[in-house]
């Protein structure tokens, strides 16, 4: 009886020891897993904190850039406002000068006015030394001087012929428009057009007889429609029997 109870007690003790060992191993594994999770969490926290710091630095850099941009925009607005005020004052002075100038010299040309207003921009003519020429910038399409002159001429009756056409523009070249049929012999421009565009076909007799034969002759001259004075007058083509064509200058 006593011998039979001993194996049973030994089995129980062994089972108890195994259960305790398993419990301790499980607890140890849980601790190891917890420590591993803590390490991972700590690393993740460090990564998130680094990202947050980088984002804050980026936001601060963006804020600084926006502040600088805003300051520059304010400065540019102020400069533009000062520029507009200065241009307005300048145009008032130029307009007043033009009105007084035309009262004193009602038959003056655009070139005369510019020479009087800006004598530093007038120079001796290339073809006729006694005629002053002005800077080519006063003939560009965007010229305020040319615009003021033309607006004033349009207000005066029978002064359409004194309107100054643009010779060029700041970006690119203006197509020449010879509305007033004027030829500028003072210009150094290289553009040439046929005189037939102004006068029509000019018929020159080659044989004087009852059956007069004619041939078309093109006359070429450098043309610039911006020059306000007509140097080359109207040419009339009159053909009569047994007579030569008459050209008037």
Image: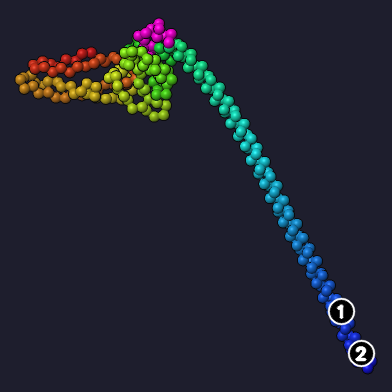
Q: Which residues are magenta?
A: 99-112
Which residue: 24% across, 16% down? Answer: 234
Residue 29: x %, y % from top left: 79, 69
State which quarter of the image contains the N terminus.
Answer: bottom right
User: Nearer the viewer's eye, disc 2 or disc 1?
Assistant: 2
Could you say which quadrant of the image residue 20 lies in? bottom right
Seen at 64% across and 35% down, the residue is 67
Q: Is residue 88 in sight in this rendering?
A: yes
Residue 184 quadrant: top left
Position of the C terminus, as image quadrant, is top left
Q: Which residue is mark 1?
A: 17
Q: Residue furthest right?
A: 2
* Location of residue 55 in the rendering, given as x and y in whole percent from the top left corner: 67, 46
Instruction: Tell me how far mark 2 sits from mark 1, CA to CA.
Output: 19 Å
Q: Tell me if mark 1 has few (under 14), some (14-19) or many (20+) residues whose alpha carbon lies within 10 angstroms of its own.
A: few
User: Looking at the image, is 154 positioned above or below residue 170?
Assistant: above
- Per the image, the residue denoted by label 2 is 5
Q: Main secondary structure of the magenta part?
A: helix
Dot 2 lies on which element?
helix
| Pick the front one: 246 or 85 | 85
Residue at the (42%, 9%) spot, across then down: 101
Frontmost residue, 209 versus 55: 55
Q: Is residue 8 left or right of residue 56?
A: right
């Amino acid at each position: 009886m006593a011998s039979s109870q001993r194996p049973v007690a030994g089995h129980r003790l062994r089972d108890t020891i195994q259960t305790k060992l398993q419990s301790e191993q499980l607890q140890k594994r849980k601790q190891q897993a917890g420590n591993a999770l803590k390490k991972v969490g700590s690393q993740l926290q460090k990564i998130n904190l680094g990202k947050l710091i980088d984002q804050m630095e980026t936001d601060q850099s963006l804020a600084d850039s926006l502040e600088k941009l805003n300051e520059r925009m304010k400065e540019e607005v102020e400069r533009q406002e000062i520029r507009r005020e200065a241009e307005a004052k300048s145009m008032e002075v130029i307009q007043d000068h033009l009105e007084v100038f035309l009262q004193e010299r009602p038959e003056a040309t655009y070139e005369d006015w510019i020479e009087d207003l800006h004598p530093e921009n007038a120079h001796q003519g290339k073809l006729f030394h006694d005629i002053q020429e002005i800077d080519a910038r006063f003939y560009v399409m965007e010229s305020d001087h040319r615009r003021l002159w033309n607006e004033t001429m349009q207000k005066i009756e029978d002064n359409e012929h004194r309107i100054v056409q643009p010779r060029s523009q700041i970006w690119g070249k203006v197509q020449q428009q010879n509305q007033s049929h004027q030829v500028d012999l003072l210009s150094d421009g290289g553009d040439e057009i046929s005189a037939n565009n102004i006068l029509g076909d000019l018929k020159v007799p080659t044989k004087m007889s009852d059956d007069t034969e004619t041939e078309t002759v093109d006359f070429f001259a450098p043309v610039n429609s911006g020059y306000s004075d007509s140097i080359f007058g109207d040419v009339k083509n009159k053909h009569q029997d047994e007579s030569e064509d008459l050209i008037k200058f």
